[in-house]
Image (cartoon, rainbow, N blue to C red):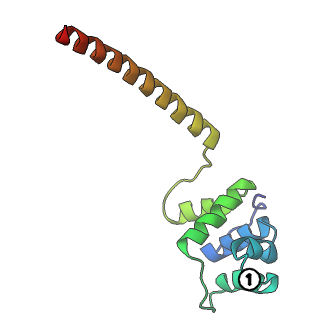
Amino acid sequence: MQLEIGEFFDSFDDALRAVVKALGGYKAVGVRMRPELPMEQAKDWVRHCLDASRRERFTPDQVLWLLREARQVGFHAAMDFLAADTGYQASPVDVQAQVQSIEASIASTLEDLNRRVAHLTKLRERAAG
């Protein structure tokens, strides 16, 4: 879900409301975030967390969860708002490419380590002999 042309957010709460909508609404998000609560109570909890006149607020970890879940459904507008509002530039990262890059780096490092261990072993054999 992407923003419609001309749609913008006045606040981060507005951006998070759009995330909740992209994730299926208050009820769908509520039962995923607060499975220990009855469905209606979980739905109300999400709604209250996004109501500036209420005391309930999402924790930073819960906000991160919402942003991660939004990314999973292709909704990036809230992260874009957060980045723009704080003077950063946001762009989705290809996690699979990161995994492959790290795996390749580890494999290369292991090959180098194995060569060094073999060389050390030869040196120790010469020194002992």
Q: Name the side, left or right, on which 78 lies relative to 119.
A: right
Residue at figure coordinates x 34%, y 20% from the top left: 117
Q: Is residue 10 above or below residue 104?
A: below
Q: Residue furthest front?
A: 129
Residue 72: % across, % down: 72, 54
Residue at horizontal 78%, vertical 61%?
4
Q: Nearer the viewer, residue 116 or 93?
A: 116
**Apparent side of residue 69 relative to residue 123 in the rendered image (left or right):** right
Residue 63: image quadrant is bottom right
Whether 79 is drawn above or below 30: the answer is above
Q: Position of residue 41 (x, y in %)?
A: 76, 86
Quadrant of the rendering where the N terminus is positioned: bottom right
Residue nearer the viewer, 11 or 40: 40
According to the picture, the residue beneath numbered tag 1 turns out to be 37
Question: In the rendered structure, which amino acid carries the disc numbered 1?
Answer: Leu
Question: Quadrant of residue 26 in the image?
Answer: bottom right
Residue 42 drawn at (x, y percent): 74, 82
| Residue located at (60% from left, 78% from top) | 58
